[in-house]
């Protein structure tokens, strides 16, 4: 069977750095077309990656003979793009998050199903050699029964500031846009949520989201998500967009830890370390970057050729991860609202619960100039 012809819809950062270079080298796929609402951008990507067709209009791209499309537009456009793909009979691999809300994702799924077409979610982390090795190790019982996952991704989303053409400092539009789309759990944490479900092969039965506002956005820019799985394991996902967001020399923190009844699997992106420690000893495993676009497109090619999704993340996987991420974010925002409106009597009850005397100044060696109780100081801070 010949290679399937695919087009890339939206030629921004992730298309240029992730999808387009990978698609050039995947067996079973012919990268045939690009489209972007910016014609110049489409042309630039056509030239850079030597692609036979760039289309000046969306309609021309849909009417072309591509079999499938990879949607790399910003999330607010995904629904409209998928509806068009269904109309023109194209299978879809759509970047995460699938859409801006659950109703839109359900509509995307129903539209594609009615058209007899496949819709996948671009959870590229699943295809990292290290993530696949973790999947295998968990199934082989290498750390016994997995009881806890600690998945951490703290970074600065390319920093808080940008500079305009006049050299003036402005708030980074990328950061503002991603915070409006839901913040770090919806944008990045969905990958970790998907990994936890995939590695454990176990659905999330309960969840709790706790937010921290390093900057005063509507959504939290630093978030903890706790998930209890049907198998009894517990996952913590910690994500941030504001870790070193103003630092001159920022560092990121990206780690997976799987803690089992016989040892720990530990992957650290920054240290390039990947290890298995159990009762037999320690094994240093082959480290791979956390994403693998070529691997994902190889699996996409297989699905296009056979109709079998195998390990491709389905639209349902995208729906579940986005639902969990949004619920966690909304829960954190509701709690922030509730605590900022808390009556002082609630603070007293909370202080009682942890044995604090909030009527007394802080117990420091030096006399305290500011007699504000520790709890109300914290509450004031979260009110901002
Ligand atoms: N999987 C990952 O690791 C990963 C990483 C970054 C971004 N993403 C996701 O990829 C998507 C795109 O992100 P990005 O960072 O590349 O954004 P971007 O803003 O850099 O690029 C988006 C591109 O889409 C074009 N565009 C906008 N509206 C369009 C429309 N209606 N039709 C056609 N083109 C349109 C823009 O001109 C732009 O070139 C988002 O959903 C984002 O969450 C995924």
Image (cartoon, rainbow, N blue to C red):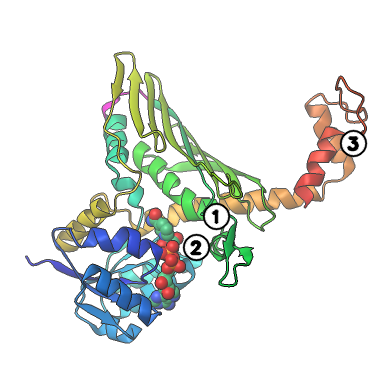
Pointer 3 or 1: first along the chain: 1
Q: Which residues are magenta?
A: 140-145
Pointer 2 or 1: first along the chain: 2
Which residue is denoted by mark 2 in the rendering?
102
Q: Position of residue 25 (x, y in %)?
A: 17, 58
Most extreme residue toward the left, as rendered? Answer: 1
What residue is at 38 percent from the left and 20 percent from the top?
A: 263
In front: mark 2 or mark 1? 1
Dividing the picture into quadrants, the one containing residue 361 is top right
SS of the residue under disc 2: helix
Q: Is mark 3 within 8 Å of ligand 1?
A: no
What residue is at 28 percent from the left and 75 percent from the top?
A: 34
Q: Position of residue 67 (x, y in %)?
A: 20, 72
SS of the residue under disc 3: loop
Which residue is denoted by mark 1 in the rendering?
326
Task: Verify whether residue 91 appears in magenta.
Answer: no
Q: Is residue 79 visible?
A: no
From mark 2 to mark 1, how far is it between C-alphas? 9 Å
In front: mark 2 or mark 3? 3
Q: Quadrant of ligand 1?
A: bottom left
- Is 237 located above or below residue 245 in the figure? above
SS of the residue under disc 1: helix
- Mark 3–mark 1 contact, CB under 8 Å? no
Q: Position of residue 362 (x, y in %)?
A: 87, 27
Q: Position of residue 274 (x, y in %)?
A: 34, 30
Which residue is denoted by mark 3 in the rendering?
372
Q: Tell which of 172 and 18 is nearer to you.
A: 172
Is residue 300 left or right of 190 when viewed as pictured?
A: left
Is residue 187 left or right of 198 when viewed as pictured?
A: right
- Mark 2–mark 1 contact, CB under 8 Å? yes
Pointer 2 or 3: first along the chain: 2
């Amino acid at each position: 069977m010949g290679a399937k012809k695919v087009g890339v819809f939206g030629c921004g950062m992730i298309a240029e750095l992730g999808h387009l270079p990978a698609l050039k080298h995947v067996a079973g796929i012919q990268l045939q077309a690009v489209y972007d609402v910016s014609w110049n951008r489409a042309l630039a990507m056509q030239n850079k990656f030597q692609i036979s067709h760039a289309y000046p209009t969306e309609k021309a791209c849909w009417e072309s003979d591509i079999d499938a499309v990879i949607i790399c537009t910003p999330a607010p456009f995904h629904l409209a793009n998928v509806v068009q793909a269904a109309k023109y009979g194209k299978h879809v691999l759509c970047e995460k998050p699938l859409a801006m809300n659950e109703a839109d994702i359900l509509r995307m799924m129903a539209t594609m199903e009615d058209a007899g077409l496949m819709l996948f979610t671009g959870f590229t982390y699943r295809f990292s050699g290290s993530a696949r090795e973790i999947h295998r190790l968990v199934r082989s019982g290498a750390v016994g029964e997995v009881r806890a996952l600690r998945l951490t991704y703290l970074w600065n989303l390319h920093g808080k500031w940008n500079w305009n053409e006049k050299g003036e400092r402005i708030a980074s539009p990328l950061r503002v846009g991603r915070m409006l789309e839901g913040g770090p759990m919806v944008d990045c944490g969905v990958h970790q949520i998907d990994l936890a479900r995939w590695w454990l092969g176990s659905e999330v039965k309960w969840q709790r989201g706790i937010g921290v506002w390093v900057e005063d956005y509507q959504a939290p820019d630093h978030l903890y998500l706790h998930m209890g799985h049907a198998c009894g394991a517990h996952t913590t996902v910690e994500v941030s967009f504001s870790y070193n967001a103003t630092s001159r020399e920022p560092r990121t923190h990206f780690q997976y830890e799987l803690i089992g009844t016989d040892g720990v699997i530990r992957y650290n992106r920054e240290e390039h370390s990947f290890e298995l420690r159990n009762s037999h000893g320690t094994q240093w495993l082959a480290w791979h970057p956390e994403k693998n676009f070529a691997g994902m497109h190889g699996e996409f090619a297989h699905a296009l050729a056979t109709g079998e999704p195998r390990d491709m993340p389905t639209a349902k996987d995208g729906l579940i991860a986005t639902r969990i991420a949004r619920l966690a974010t909304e829960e954190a925002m509701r709690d922030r609202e509730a605590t900022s409106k808390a009556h002082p009597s609630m603070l007293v009850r909370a202080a009682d619960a942890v044995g604090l005397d909030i009527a007394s100044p802080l117990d420091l060696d030096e006399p305290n100039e500011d007699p504000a109780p520790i709890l109300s100081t914290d509450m004031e801070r979260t009110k901002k």
